[in-house]
Image (cartoon, helix red, strand yellow):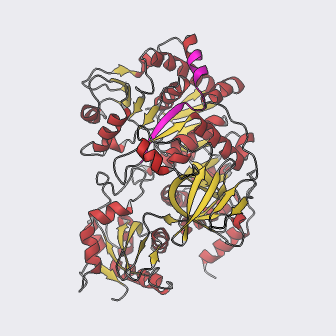
Protein backbone atom coordinates (compact mmCIF):
# COMPACT_ATOMS: atom_id res chain seq x y z
CA UNK A 1 0.00 0.00 0.00
CA UNK A 2 1.34 3.43 -0.95
CA UNK A 3 1.92 6.18 1.61
CA UNK A 4 -0.96 8.13 0.05
CA UNK A 5 -3.27 5.13 0.38
CA UNK A 6 -2.25 4.73 4.02
CA UNK A 7 -3.09 8.39 4.74
CA UNK A 8 -6.46 8.04 3.01
CA UNK A 9 -7.27 4.92 5.02
CA UNK A 10 -6.35 6.58 8.30
CA UNK A 11 -8.41 9.65 7.45
CA UNK A 12 -11.45 7.57 6.55
CA UNK A 13 -11.22 5.66 9.83
CA UNK A 14 -10.87 8.75 12.02
CA UNK A 15 -13.90 9.97 13.97
CA UNK A 16 -15.91 12.92 12.70
CA UNK A 17 -15.75 16.04 14.87
CA UNK A 18 -19.11 16.48 16.55
CA UNK A 19 -21.23 19.33 15.27
CA UNK A 20 -24.91 20.11 15.63
CA UNK A 21 -26.62 20.24 12.22
CA UNK A 22 -30.20 20.25 11.01
CA UNK A 23 -32.26 17.22 9.94
CA UNK A 24 -31.83 15.59 6.53
CA UNK A 25 -35.26 14.39 5.47
CA UNK A 26 -37.61 15.37 2.68
CA UNK A 27 -41.23 15.17 1.56
CA UNK A 28 -41.61 14.18 -2.09
CA UNK A 29 -44.65 14.38 -4.38
CA UNK A 30 -44.49 12.88 -7.89
CA UNK A 31 -46.99 14.05 -10.51
CA UNK A 32 -48.26 12.01 -13.50
CA UNK A 33 -46.39 14.25 -15.96
CA UNK A 34 -43.07 13.42 -14.29
CA UNK A 35 -42.76 16.66 -12.30
CA UNK A 36 -41.46 16.15 -8.76
CA UNK A 37 -42.02 18.51 -5.81
CA UNK A 38 -39.72 18.36 -2.77
CA UNK A 39 -39.76 20.23 0.53
CA UNK A 40 -38.57 19.88 4.09
CA UNK A 41 -41.16 18.46 6.51
CA UNK A 42 -39.91 20.87 9.19
CA UNK A 43 -41.37 24.37 9.61
CA UNK A 44 -39.26 27.44 9.09
CA UNK A 45 -38.57 29.25 12.35
CA UNK A 46 -39.86 32.78 12.83
CA UNK A 47 -37.62 35.52 11.50
CA UNK A 48 -37.46 39.30 12.04
CA UNK A 49 -39.00 41.87 9.71
CA UNK A 50 -35.59 43.43 9.00
CA UNK A 51 -31.99 42.41 9.47
CA UNK A 52 -31.11 45.57 11.40
CA UNK A 53 -33.29 44.35 14.29
CA UNK A 54 -30.59 41.75 14.87
CA UNK A 55 -27.99 44.51 15.16
CA UNK A 56 -30.12 46.21 17.80
CA UNK A 57 -30.60 42.86 19.57
CA UNK A 58 -26.90 42.03 19.80
CA UNK A 59 -25.97 45.59 20.76
CA UNK A 60 -28.05 44.97 23.90
CA UNK A 61 -27.38 41.23 24.44
CA UNK A 62 -23.61 41.30 23.73
CA UNK A 63 -22.57 44.96 23.45
CA UNK A 64 -18.84 44.35 23.91
CA UNK A 65 -18.53 41.41 21.53
CA UNK A 66 -16.49 42.10 18.40
CA UNK A 67 -18.75 42.27 15.36
CA UNK A 68 -16.46 43.67 12.65
CA UNK A 69 -12.68 43.55 12.40
CA UNK A 70 -10.30 44.65 9.66
CA UNK A 71 -6.55 45.09 9.31
CA UNK A 72 -5.37 48.62 9.99
CA UNK A 73 -2.45 50.23 8.18
CA UNK A 74 -0.05 49.22 10.97
CA UNK A 75 -1.09 45.55 10.70
CA UNK A 76 -3.16 45.46 13.89
CA UNK A 77 -6.85 44.57 13.93
CA UNK A 78 -9.22 47.51 13.92
CA UNK A 79 -12.34 46.26 15.73
CA UNK A 80 -15.91 47.42 16.28
CA UNK A 81 -18.18 45.89 18.90
CA UNK A 82 -21.90 45.47 18.38
CA UNK A 83 -22.62 48.51 20.53
CA UNK A 84 -20.11 50.65 18.64
CA UNK A 85 -21.45 49.46 15.31
CA UNK A 86 -25.03 50.34 16.19
CA UNK A 87 -24.01 53.82 17.36
CA UNK A 88 -22.12 54.54 14.14
CA UNK A 89 -24.87 53.07 11.96
CA UNK A 90 -27.44 55.34 13.58
CA UNK A 91 -25.24 58.40 13.05
CA UNK A 92 -24.77 57.54 9.37
CA UNK A 93 -28.49 56.85 9.02
CA UNK A 94 -29.22 60.39 10.26
CA UNK A 95 -26.82 61.79 7.65
CA UNK A 96 -28.48 59.77 4.92
CA UNK A 97 -31.94 60.99 5.93
CA UNK A 98 -30.73 64.56 5.48
CA UNK A 99 -29.84 63.75 1.86
CA UNK A 100 -33.35 62.67 0.85
CA UNK A 101 -32.19 59.36 -0.57
CA UNK A 102 -34.88 56.88 -1.61
CA UNK A 103 -35.69 53.93 -3.85
CA UNK A 104 -35.46 56.39 -6.74
CA UNK A 105 -32.12 57.70 -5.46
CA UNK A 106 -30.39 54.72 -3.79
CA UNK A 107 -26.75 54.26 -2.82
CA UNK A 108 -24.02 52.73 -4.98
CA UNK A 109 -20.88 51.29 -3.38
CA UNK A 110 -17.94 50.94 -5.77
CA UNK A 111 -15.27 49.62 -3.40
CA UNK A 112 -14.92 46.22 -1.74
CA UNK A 113 -15.32 44.75 1.71
CA UNK A 114 -14.39 47.02 4.57
CA UNK A 115 -15.87 48.41 7.77
CA UNK A 116 -17.13 51.62 6.14
CA UNK A 117 -18.89 49.57 3.45
CA UNK A 118 -20.63 47.54 6.16
CA UNK A 119 -21.64 50.59 8.19
CA UNK A 120 -23.03 52.40 5.15
CA UNK A 121 -25.01 49.37 4.01
CA UNK A 122 -26.50 48.79 7.47
CA UNK A 123 -27.37 52.48 7.83
CA UNK A 124 -29.15 52.41 4.46
CA UNK A 125 -31.13 49.35 5.49
CA UNK A 126 -32.04 50.96 8.80
CA UNK A 127 -33.92 53.78 7.07
CA UNK A 128 -35.23 51.81 4.08
CA UNK A 129 -32.90 53.15 1.37
CA UNK A 130 -31.72 50.45 -1.06
CA UNK A 131 -28.01 50.15 -1.72
CA UNK A 132 -26.05 48.35 -4.41
CA UNK A 133 -22.54 46.98 -3.82
CA UNK A 134 -20.95 46.93 -7.28
CA UNK A 135 -18.24 44.57 -8.47
CA UNK A 136 -14.86 46.24 -7.90
CA UNK A 137 -13.37 44.99 -11.20
CA UNK A 138 -16.03 46.95 -13.06
CA UNK A 139 -14.19 50.04 -11.76
CA UNK A 140 -10.58 48.85 -11.56
CA UNK A 141 -10.13 46.11 -14.16
CA UNK A 142 -12.36 47.24 -17.01
CA UNK A 143 -10.90 49.22 -19.88
CA UNK A 144 -14.17 50.77 -21.07
CA UNK A 145 -16.25 50.87 -17.84
CA UNK A 146 -19.17 49.56 -19.91
CA UNK A 147 -20.75 47.48 -17.16
CA UNK A 148 -20.29 50.17 -14.53
CA UNK A 149 -21.90 52.77 -16.79
CA UNK A 150 -24.83 50.42 -17.41
CA UNK A 151 -25.35 49.83 -13.67
CA UNK A 152 -25.20 53.52 -12.77
CA UNK A 153 -27.72 54.27 -15.51
CA UNK A 154 -30.10 51.54 -14.29
CA UNK A 155 -29.65 52.40 -10.62
CA UNK A 156 -29.86 56.24 -10.73
CA UNK A 157 -28.04 56.60 -7.39
CA UNK A 158 -28.22 59.68 -5.22
CA UNK A 159 -24.92 58.89 -3.49
CA UNK A 160 -21.84 56.92 -4.53
CA UNK A 161 -19.25 55.61 -2.06
CA UNK A 162 -15.65 54.58 -2.74
CA UNK A 163 -13.08 53.82 -0.06
CA UNK A 164 -10.23 55.54 -1.93
CA UNK A 165 -11.09 58.54 -4.09
CA UNK A 166 -7.92 58.46 -6.16
CA UNK A 167 -8.02 54.71 -6.84
CA UNK A 168 -11.59 54.98 -8.15
CA UNK A 169 -11.16 58.41 -9.78
CA UNK A 170 -11.11 57.13 -13.40
CA UNK A 171 -14.23 55.02 -12.88
CA UNK A 172 -16.08 57.87 -11.16
CA UNK A 173 -15.11 60.30 -13.91
CA UNK A 174 -16.26 57.86 -16.61
CA UNK A 175 -19.51 56.63 -15.11
CA UNK A 176 -20.87 58.87 -12.34
CA UNK A 177 -22.74 62.07 -13.33
CA UNK A 178 -21.42 65.31 -11.86
CA UNK A 179 -24.57 66.01 -9.82
CA UNK A 180 -24.24 62.85 -7.71
CA UNK A 181 -22.57 63.16 -4.30
CA UNK A 182 -19.35 61.16 -3.91
CA UNK A 183 -18.33 59.96 -0.43
CA UNK A 184 -14.81 58.63 0.18
CA UNK A 185 -12.95 57.31 3.20
CA UNK A 186 -9.57 58.63 2.08
CA UNK A 187 -7.62 60.31 -0.74
CA UNK A 188 -10.28 62.47 -2.38
CA UNK A 189 -9.91 62.95 -6.11
CA UNK A 190 -10.26 66.13 -8.13
CA UNK A 191 -14.07 66.20 -7.95
CA UNK A 192 -15.74 67.60 -4.82
CA UNK A 193 -16.09 64.65 -2.46
CA UNK A 194 -17.51 64.19 1.04
CA UNK A 195 -15.30 62.57 3.71
CA UNK A 196 -16.89 59.50 5.28
CA UNK A 197 -16.22 61.04 8.68
CA UNK A 198 -18.82 63.70 7.85
CA UNK A 199 -21.49 60.98 7.77
CA UNK A 200 -20.41 59.85 11.24
CA UNK A 201 -20.61 63.38 12.66
CA UNK A 202 -24.41 63.58 12.72
CA UNK A 203 -26.35 63.18 15.96
CA UNK A 204 -29.16 60.62 15.57
CA UNK A 205 -32.67 61.95 16.13
CA UNK A 206 -36.06 60.34 16.47
CA UNK A 207 -36.29 60.49 12.68
CA UNK A 208 -33.98 57.47 12.51
CA UNK A 209 -36.32 55.50 14.79
CA UNK A 210 -39.33 56.57 12.75
CA UNK A 211 -37.71 55.53 9.48
CA UNK A 212 -36.61 52.22 10.96
CA UNK A 213 -40.15 51.40 12.11
CA UNK A 214 -41.43 51.92 8.56
CA UNK A 215 -39.02 49.36 7.08
CA UNK A 216 -41.00 46.18 6.38
CA UNK A 217 -40.34 42.69 5.08
CA UNK A 218 -41.19 43.96 1.58
CA UNK A 219 -38.71 46.84 1.73
CA UNK A 220 -35.85 46.62 -0.75
CA UNK A 221 -32.67 46.10 1.27
CA UNK A 222 -30.17 45.95 -1.54
CA UNK A 223 -29.78 45.44 -5.26
CA UNK A 224 -27.21 42.86 -6.31
CA UNK A 225 -26.12 42.91 -9.92
CA UNK A 226 -25.47 39.59 -11.60
CA UNK A 227 -22.14 39.00 -13.29
CA UNK A 228 -23.40 40.07 -16.69
CA UNK A 229 -21.55 37.21 -18.36
CA UNK A 230 -24.32 36.86 -20.95
CA UNK A 231 -24.89 40.59 -21.40
CA UNK A 232 -25.03 43.72 -19.27
CA UNK A 233 -25.59 43.12 -15.53
CA UNK A 234 -29.16 42.97 -14.27
CA UNK A 235 -30.14 44.08 -10.78
CA UNK A 236 -31.66 41.45 -8.51
CA UNK A 237 -34.00 42.96 -5.92
CA UNK A 238 -33.17 41.71 -2.40
CA UNK A 239 -35.92 42.40 0.12
CA UNK A 240 -35.72 42.25 3.88
CA UNK A 241 -37.93 39.16 3.75
CA UNK A 242 -35.40 37.43 1.52
CA UNK A 243 -32.44 38.22 3.77
CA UNK A 244 -34.13 37.39 7.06
CA UNK A 245 -35.95 34.25 5.97
CA UNK A 246 -32.79 32.90 4.38
CA UNK A 247 -30.88 33.35 7.61
CA UNK A 248 -33.60 31.40 9.41
CA UNK A 249 -33.11 28.68 6.79
CA UNK A 250 -29.34 28.69 7.36
CA UNK A 251 -29.88 28.39 11.12
CA UNK A 252 -32.07 25.38 10.45
CA UNK A 253 -29.23 23.61 8.65
CA UNK A 254 -26.14 24.86 10.53
CA UNK A 255 -27.77 24.44 13.91
CA UNK A 256 -24.51 24.88 15.87
CA UNK A 257 -24.40 28.63 15.07
CA UNK A 258 -27.46 29.15 17.29
CA UNK A 259 -25.52 28.05 20.37
CA UNK A 260 -22.04 29.14 19.29
CA UNK A 261 -21.91 32.50 17.48
CA UNK A 262 -19.85 31.97 14.32
CA UNK A 263 -16.38 33.41 13.86
CA UNK A 264 -15.49 34.01 10.22
CA UNK A 265 -12.33 34.98 8.39
CA UNK A 266 -13.96 35.78 5.11
CA UNK A 267 -12.99 37.29 1.75
CA UNK A 268 -15.87 36.64 -0.76
CA UNK A 269 -16.92 40.06 -2.12
CA UNK A 270 -20.07 41.63 -0.74
CA UNK A 271 -21.37 42.47 -4.20
CA UNK A 272 -22.00 38.72 -4.48
CA UNK A 273 -24.75 37.00 -2.58
CA UNK A 274 -22.41 34.36 -1.08
CA UNK A 275 -20.24 36.87 0.79
CA UNK A 276 -22.63 39.78 1.22
CA UNK A 277 -25.81 37.90 2.11
CA UNK A 278 -24.95 34.39 3.28
CA UNK A 279 -21.71 34.99 5.17
CA UNK A 280 -22.18 38.54 6.46
CA UNK A 281 -25.83 37.87 7.30
CA UNK A 282 -24.99 34.66 9.16
CA UNK A 283 -22.60 36.52 11.45
CA UNK A 284 -24.99 39.41 12.13
CA UNK A 285 -28.08 37.25 12.58
CA UNK A 286 -26.34 34.99 15.10
CA UNK A 287 -24.20 37.50 16.97
CA UNK A 288 -20.86 36.32 15.63
CA UNK A 289 -17.61 38.03 14.68
CA UNK A 290 -16.64 38.87 11.11
CA UNK A 291 -12.93 39.27 10.37
CA UNK A 292 -12.66 40.89 6.96
CA UNK A 293 -10.05 39.04 4.93
CA UNK A 294 -8.33 41.32 2.43
CA UNK A 295 -6.77 38.29 0.75
CA UNK A 296 -8.06 36.43 -2.29
CA UNK A 297 -7.42 33.02 -3.88
CA UNK A 298 -4.96 34.52 -6.35
CA UNK A 299 -1.17 34.45 -6.60
CA UNK A 300 0.23 37.31 -4.55
CA UNK A 301 -3.05 37.78 -2.65
CA UNK A 302 -3.52 34.44 -0.88
CA UNK A 303 -0.69 35.31 1.52
CA UNK A 304 -2.90 37.88 3.25
CA UNK A 305 -5.47 35.16 3.90
CA UNK A 306 -2.77 32.89 5.31
CA UNK A 307 -1.60 35.63 7.66
CA UNK A 308 -5.12 36.17 8.94
CA UNK A 309 -5.76 32.46 9.46
CA UNK A 310 -2.55 32.15 11.48
CA UNK A 311 -4.04 34.63 13.98
CA UNK A 312 -7.80 34.03 13.90
CA UNK A 313 -9.28 30.55 14.27
CA UNK A 314 -12.64 30.40 12.46
CA UNK A 315 -15.46 28.17 13.66
CA UNK A 316 -16.69 27.72 10.09
CA UNK A 317 -14.65 28.37 6.96
CA UNK A 318 -16.53 29.26 3.79
CA UNK A 319 -14.81 29.55 0.45
CA UNK A 320 -14.99 28.81 -3.24
CA UNK A 321 -13.17 25.61 -4.30
CA UNK A 322 -10.22 27.57 -5.71
CA UNK A 323 -9.74 29.19 -2.32
CA UNK A 324 -9.40 25.82 -0.60
CA UNK A 325 -7.04 24.61 -3.31
CA UNK A 326 -4.73 27.61 -2.95
CA UNK A 327 -4.55 27.15 0.82
CA UNK A 328 -3.23 23.59 0.52
CA UNK A 329 0.51 24.30 0.09
CA UNK A 330 0.48 26.71 3.03
CA UNK A 331 -1.35 24.27 5.28
CA UNK A 332 1.10 21.53 4.24
CA UNK A 333 4.20 23.51 5.13
CA UNK A 334 3.08 25.57 8.15
CA UNK A 335 2.37 23.61 11.31
CA UNK A 336 1.25 26.66 13.31
CA UNK A 337 -1.19 27.68 10.56
CA UNK A 338 -2.58 24.17 10.36
CA UNK A 339 -3.08 23.89 14.11
CA UNK A 340 -4.82 27.24 14.39
CA UNK A 341 -6.97 26.67 11.30
CA UNK A 342 -8.40 23.37 12.52
CA UNK A 343 -8.40 24.17 16.28
CA UNK A 344 -12.08 25.10 16.65
CA UNK A 345 -13.36 24.40 13.15
CA UNK A 346 -16.84 22.90 13.05
CA UNK A 347 -17.56 22.98 9.32
CA UNK A 348 -15.69 23.42 6.04
CA UNK A 349 -18.11 24.86 3.51
CA UNK A 350 -17.68 25.34 -0.23
CA UNK A 351 -20.00 26.82 -2.84
CA UNK A 352 -19.88 28.43 -6.26
CA UNK A 353 -18.41 25.43 -8.09
CA UNK A 354 -17.54 21.78 -7.66
CA UNK A 355 -14.69 20.89 -5.28
CA UNK A 356 -11.94 18.69 -6.74
CA UNK A 357 -11.59 15.31 -5.06
CA UNK A 358 -7.87 15.70 -4.36
CA UNK A 359 -8.52 18.96 -2.48
CA UNK A 360 -11.28 17.35 -0.40
CA UNK A 361 -9.08 14.33 0.45
CA UNK A 362 -5.98 16.29 1.40
CA UNK A 363 -7.86 18.68 3.68
CA UNK A 364 -9.40 15.74 5.51
CA UNK A 365 -6.00 14.07 5.85
CA UNK A 366 -4.55 17.29 7.28
CA UNK A 367 -7.44 17.64 9.73
CA UNK A 368 -6.92 14.09 10.98
CA UNK A 369 -3.15 14.49 11.21
CA UNK A 370 -3.59 17.74 13.16
CA UNK A 371 -6.57 17.00 15.42
CA UNK A 372 -7.25 13.28 15.15
CA UNK A 373 -10.71 14.08 13.75
CA UNK A 374 -12.28 14.63 10.37
CA UNK A 375 -14.07 17.94 9.77
CA UNK A 376 -17.36 17.72 7.94
CA UNK A 377 -17.38 19.24 4.46
CA UNK A 378 -20.73 20.78 3.51
CA UNK A 379 -22.08 22.49 0.44
CA UNK A 380 -25.16 24.26 -0.83
CA UNK A 381 -26.81 25.51 -3.99
CA UNK A 382 -28.44 28.84 -4.65
CA UNK A 383 -28.20 32.04 -6.62
CA UNK A 384 -28.46 35.78 -6.26
CA UNK A 385 -32.20 35.38 -6.80
CA UNK A 386 -32.54 32.95 -3.86
CA UNK A 387 -30.74 35.13 -1.25
CA UNK A 388 -28.73 32.70 -1.78
CA UNK A 389 -29.24 29.37 0.02
CA UNK A 390 -31.95 27.13 -1.45
CA UNK A 391 -30.55 23.62 -1.07
CA UNK A 392 -28.07 22.46 1.55
CA UNK A 393 -26.48 19.24 2.71
CA UNK A 394 -26.49 18.67 6.48
CA UNK A 395 -24.85 15.25 6.57
CA UNK A 396 -21.48 13.78 5.67
CA UNK A 397 -21.08 12.77 2.05
CA UNK A 398 -18.59 10.26 0.69
CA UNK A 399 -17.70 12.50 -2.22
CA UNK A 400 -17.82 16.15 -3.29
CA UNK A 401 -20.77 17.36 -5.32
CA UNK A 402 -23.76 16.48 -3.14
CA UNK A 403 -25.68 19.74 -2.62
CA UNK A 404 -28.32 18.34 -0.31
CA UNK A 405 -32.04 18.96 -0.08
CA UNK A 406 -34.43 21.93 0.10
CA UNK A 407 -33.97 24.09 3.16
CA UNK A 408 -36.91 24.70 5.47
CA UNK A 409 -39.40 26.98 3.77
CA UNK A 410 -38.13 26.24 0.25
CA UNK A 411 -40.16 24.31 -2.31
CA UNK A 412 -38.18 22.63 -5.08
CA UNK A 413 -39.88 21.70 -8.33
CA UNK A 414 -38.07 19.29 -10.65
CA UNK A 415 -39.38 19.62 -14.20
CA UNK A 416 -38.43 17.00 -16.82
CA UNK A 417 -36.35 18.58 -19.60
CA UNK A 418 -34.65 16.56 -22.37
CA UNK A 419 -33.76 13.67 -20.10
CA UNK A 420 -32.83 15.89 -17.15
CA UNK A 421 -34.63 17.68 -14.33
CA UNK A 422 -34.72 21.48 -14.29
CA UNK A 423 -34.73 22.88 -10.76
CA UNK A 424 -37.22 25.62 -9.90
CA UNK A 425 -37.72 27.29 -6.51
CA UNK A 426 -40.43 28.98 -4.45
CA UNK A 427 -40.27 30.45 -0.96
CA UNK A 428 -39.86 33.65 1.08
CA UNK A 429 -36.17 33.83 0.09
CA UNK A 430 -36.94 34.25 -3.63
CA UNK A 431 -36.54 37.66 -5.28
CA UNK A 432 -39.68 39.47 -6.43
CA UNK A 433 -37.81 40.32 -9.64
CA UNK A 434 -35.26 42.50 -11.36
CA UNK A 435 -34.70 46.20 -10.76
CA UNK A 436 -36.66 48.20 -13.32
CA UNK A 437 -36.89 45.19 -15.65
CA UNK A 438 -40.47 43.83 -15.55
CA UNK A 439 -39.81 42.03 -18.84
CA UNK A 440 -37.02 39.94 -17.32
CA UNK A 441 -39.04 39.36 -14.17
CA UNK A 442 -41.94 37.91 -16.14
CA UNK A 443 -39.65 35.50 -18.02
CA UNK A 444 -38.00 34.23 -14.85
CA UNK A 445 -41.04 32.71 -13.11
CA UNK A 446 -43.28 29.88 -14.24
CA UNK A 447 -47.07 29.70 -14.06
CA UNK A 448 -46.95 28.50 -10.42
CA UNK A 449 -44.60 31.27 -9.31
CA UNK A 450 -41.46 29.12 -9.18
CA UNK A 451 -38.17 30.83 -9.99
CA UNK A 452 -36.43 29.18 -12.94
CA UNK A 453 -32.73 29.06 -12.05
CA UNK A 454 -31.68 27.22 -15.20
CA UNK A 455 -29.74 24.47 -13.43
CA UNK A 456 -30.28 20.77 -14.00
CA UNK A 457 -30.38 18.54 -10.91
CA UNK A 458 -30.38 14.79 -10.35
CA UNK A 459 -30.74 12.51 -7.35
CA UNK A 460 -27.53 11.19 -5.81
CA UNK A 461 -29.41 7.91 -5.37
CA UNK A 462 -32.58 7.61 -7.52
CA UNK A 463 -33.91 4.96 -5.11
CA UNK A 464 -33.52 7.20 -2.05
CA UNK A 465 -34.27 10.94 -2.50
CA UNK A 466 -33.20 11.65 1.09
CA UNK A 467 -29.59 11.09 0.02
CA UNK A 468 -29.62 14.45 -1.70
CA UNK A 469 -29.20 16.02 -5.10
CA UNK A 470 -26.33 16.61 -7.48
CA UNK A 471 -25.76 19.52 -9.83
CA UNK A 472 -26.26 18.25 -13.38
CA UNK A 473 -25.09 21.25 -15.40
CA UNK A 474 -26.58 24.42 -16.81
CA UNK A 475 -29.39 23.57 -19.21
CA UNK A 476 -28.47 26.44 -21.53
CA UNK A 477 -24.93 25.08 -21.91
CA UNK A 478 -25.80 21.49 -22.82
CA UNK A 479 -25.78 20.63 -26.51
CA UNK A 480 -26.34 17.79 -28.98
CA UNK A 481 -23.72 16.11 -31.12
CA UNK A 482 -24.41 15.61 -34.81
CA UNK A 483 -25.72 12.16 -33.88
CA UNK A 484 -28.48 13.79 -31.81
CA UNK A 485 -26.90 12.64 -28.52
CA UNK A 486 -27.03 15.11 -25.64
CA UNK A 487 -23.78 16.18 -23.98
CA UNK A 488 -23.86 17.30 -20.35
CA UNK A 489 -21.23 20.02 -20.40
CA UNK A 490 -21.15 20.55 -16.64
CA UNK A 491 -20.38 16.92 -15.94
CA UNK A 492 -17.76 16.71 -18.69
CA UNK A 493 -16.04 19.90 -17.61
CA UNK A 494 -15.90 18.85 -13.95
CA UNK A 495 -14.60 15.40 -14.89
CA UNK A 496 -11.90 16.85 -17.14
CA UNK A 497 -10.71 19.49 -14.65
CA UNK A 498 -10.61 16.94 -11.83
CA UNK A 499 -8.79 14.37 -13.99
CA UNK A 500 -6.17 16.90 -15.09
CA UNK A 501 -5.64 18.55 -11.68
CA UNK A 502 -3.61 20.53 -10.86
CA UNK A 503 -2.60 21.39 -14.43
CA UNK A 504 -5.96 22.96 -15.36
CA UNK A 505 -7.65 26.05 -13.95
CA UNK A 506 -10.79 25.71 -16.03
CA UNK A 507 -12.07 24.34 -19.33
CA UNK A 508 -14.79 24.90 -21.90
CA UNK A 509 -16.45 21.98 -23.67
CA UNK A 510 -17.15 22.23 -27.42
CA UNK A 511 -18.96 19.97 -29.88
CA UNK A 512 -22.42 21.31 -30.72
CA UNK A 513 -23.56 19.67 -33.98
CA UNK A 514 -20.14 17.98 -34.34
CA UNK A 515 -19.21 14.31 -34.39
CA UNK A 516 -17.28 14.36 -31.10
CA UNK A 517 -16.41 16.41 -28.01
CA UNK A 518 -13.36 18.65 -27.69
CA UNK A 519 -12.12 21.04 -25.03
CA UNK A 520 -10.53 24.48 -24.78
CA UNK A 521 -8.24 24.47 -21.76
CA UNK A 522 -7.32 27.36 -19.45
CA UNK A 523 -4.18 25.84 -17.94
CA UNK A 524 -2.58 26.57 -14.59
CA UNK A 525 0.67 27.87 -16.03
CA UNK A 526 2.62 27.56 -12.78
CA UNK A 527 1.59 23.92 -12.30
CA UNK A 528 2.35 23.25 -15.97
CA UNK A 529 5.77 24.86 -15.58
CA UNK A 530 6.58 22.51 -12.70
CA UNK A 531 5.27 19.51 -14.64
CA UNK A 532 7.51 20.41 -17.59
CA UNK A 533 10.50 21.04 -15.32
CA UNK A 534 11.01 24.56 -16.67
CA UNK A 535 12.38 27.57 -14.82
CA UNK A 536 10.38 30.49 -13.51
CA UNK A 537 11.56 32.65 -16.42
CA UNK A 538 9.90 30.44 -19.04
CA UNK A 539 7.18 32.34 -20.90
CA UNK A 540 3.63 30.91 -20.76
CA UNK A 541 3.60 30.17 -24.50
CA UNK A 542 6.88 28.25 -24.18
CA UNK A 543 5.57 26.31 -21.20
CA UNK A 544 2.42 25.22 -23.00
CA UNK A 545 4.38 24.22 -26.12
CA UNK A 546 6.78 22.03 -24.13
CA UNK A 547 6.74 18.44 -25.51
CA UNK A 548 6.91 16.88 -22.05
CA UNK A 549 3.85 18.81 -20.88
CA UNK A 550 1.90 18.11 -24.06
CA UNK A 551 2.64 14.41 -23.73
CA UNK A 552 1.36 14.48 -20.14
CA UNK A 553 -1.89 16.06 -21.32
CA UNK A 554 -2.17 13.49 -24.13
CA UNK A 555 -1.76 10.64 -21.65
CA UNK A 556 -4.40 12.10 -19.33
CA UNK A 557 -6.77 12.77 -22.19
CA UNK A 558 -6.33 9.20 -23.45
CA UNK A 559 -6.81 7.73 -19.98
CA UNK A 560 -10.00 9.75 -19.55
CA UNK A 561 -11.25 8.60 -22.96
CA UNK A 562 -10.76 4.96 -21.97
CA UNK A 563 -13.13 5.53 -19.05
CA UNK A 564 -15.83 6.90 -21.34
CA UNK A 565 -18.81 4.86 -22.41
CA UNK A 566 -19.57 6.61 -25.69
CA UNK A 567 -19.39 9.73 -27.84
CA UNK A 568 -21.39 11.84 -25.38
CA UNK A 569 -18.75 11.41 -22.66
CA UNK A 570 -15.48 11.01 -24.61
CA UNK A 571 -13.30 14.11 -25.01
CA UNK A 572 -11.17 13.59 -28.11
CA UNK A 573 -9.00 16.69 -28.55
CA UNK A 574 -7.78 19.72 -26.61
CA UNK A 575 -6.03 23.04 -27.12
CA UNK A 576 -4.08 24.72 -24.31
CA UNK A 577 -4.75 28.47 -24.38
CA UNK A 578 -2.08 30.93 -23.28
CA UNK A 579 -4.54 33.85 -23.18
CA UNK A 580 -6.53 33.95 -19.92
CA UNK A 581 -10.28 34.53 -20.01
CA UNK A 582 -11.20 38.13 -20.82
CA UNK A 583 -13.15 40.06 -18.22
CA UNK A 584 -14.32 42.82 -20.57
CA UNK A 585 -15.43 40.27 -23.19
CA UNK A 586 -17.59 38.51 -20.61
CA UNK A 587 -15.56 35.29 -20.66
CA UNK A 588 -14.91 35.54 -16.92
CA UNK A 589 -16.77 37.03 -14.01
CA UNK A 590 -15.13 38.78 -11.07
CA UNK A 591 -15.71 35.70 -8.92
CA UNK A 592 -13.67 33.59 -11.31
CA UNK A 593 -16.38 31.60 -13.05
CA UNK A 594 -16.21 30.98 -16.79
CA UNK A 595 -19.02 31.70 -19.24
CA UNK A 596 -18.90 28.85 -21.72
CA UNK A 597 -21.01 30.60 -24.35
CA UNK A 598 -18.87 33.75 -24.34
CA UNK A 599 -15.63 31.76 -24.64
CA UNK A 600 -16.94 29.65 -27.53
CA UNK A 601 -18.14 32.76 -29.34
CA UNK A 602 -14.99 34.83 -28.87
CA UNK A 603 -12.68 31.92 -29.62
CA UNK A 604 -14.63 30.39 -32.48
CA UNK A 605 -11.43 30.17 -34.49
CA UNK A 606 -9.90 27.85 -31.90
CA UNK A 607 -13.00 25.67 -31.98
CA UNK A 608 -12.66 25.36 -35.74
CA UNK A 609 -9.01 24.47 -35.23
CA UNK A 610 -10.01 21.63 -32.91
CA UNK A 611 -12.08 20.07 -35.71
CA UNK A 612 -9.83 20.90 -38.69
CA UNK A 613 -8.16 18.11 -40.69
CA UNK A 614 -5.28 17.66 -40.71
CA UNK A 615 -4.91 18.68 -37.07
CA UNK A 616 -2.81 21.73 -36.27
CA UNK A 617 0.32 21.44 -34.17
CA UNK A 618 -1.51 23.00 -31.19
CA UNK A 619 -4.13 20.26 -30.98
CA UNK A 620 -3.55 17.48 -28.43
CA UNK A 621 -5.42 14.37 -29.50
CA UNK A 622 -6.17 10.92 -28.10
CA UNK A 623 -5.48 9.69 -31.63
CA UNK A 624 -1.85 10.83 -31.69
Image height check: is 161 above or below 246? above
Image height check: is 450 above or below 460? above
Report if residue 353 is visible in the image. no
Residue 48 shown in magenta: no
At x 55%, y 47%, the residue is 386
- Extreme-bottom residue of the structure: 623
Query: Between residues 397 and 5, which one lies in front from this camera angle?
Result: 397
Q: Give the range drawn in magenta.
A: 209-226
Query: Between residues 462 and 249, which one lies in front from this camera angle?
Result: 462
Snapshot quadrant of residue 497: bottom left
Q: How many labels does the image show?
A: 0
At x 47%, y 30%, the residue is 130
The percent position of residue 563, horizontal first and vertical second, equals 51, 84
Report if residue 241 is visible in the image. yes
The percent position of residue 302, horizontal first and vertical second, equals 45, 51
The percent position of residue 540, horizontal first and vertical second, equals 28, 66
**Which quadrant does the C terminus fall into?**
bottom left
Amino acid sequence: MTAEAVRETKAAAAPLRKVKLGPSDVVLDRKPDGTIYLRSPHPLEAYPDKLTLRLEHWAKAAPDRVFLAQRAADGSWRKLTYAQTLAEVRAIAQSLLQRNLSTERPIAILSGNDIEHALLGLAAMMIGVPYAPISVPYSLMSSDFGKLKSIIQILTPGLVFAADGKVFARAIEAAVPLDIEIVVTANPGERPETPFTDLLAATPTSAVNDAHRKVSTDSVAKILFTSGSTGMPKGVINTQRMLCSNQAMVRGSLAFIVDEPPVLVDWPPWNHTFGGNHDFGMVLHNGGSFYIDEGKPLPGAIEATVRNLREIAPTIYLNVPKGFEMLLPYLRSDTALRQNFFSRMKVLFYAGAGLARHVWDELQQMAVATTGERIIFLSSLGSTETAPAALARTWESEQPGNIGLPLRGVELKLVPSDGKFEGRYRGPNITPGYWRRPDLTKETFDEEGFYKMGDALKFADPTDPAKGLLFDGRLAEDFKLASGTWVSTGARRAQFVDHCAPLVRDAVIAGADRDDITVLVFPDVEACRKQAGLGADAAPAAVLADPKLREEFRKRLSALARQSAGSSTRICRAILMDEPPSFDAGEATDKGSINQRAVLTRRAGLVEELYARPASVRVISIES
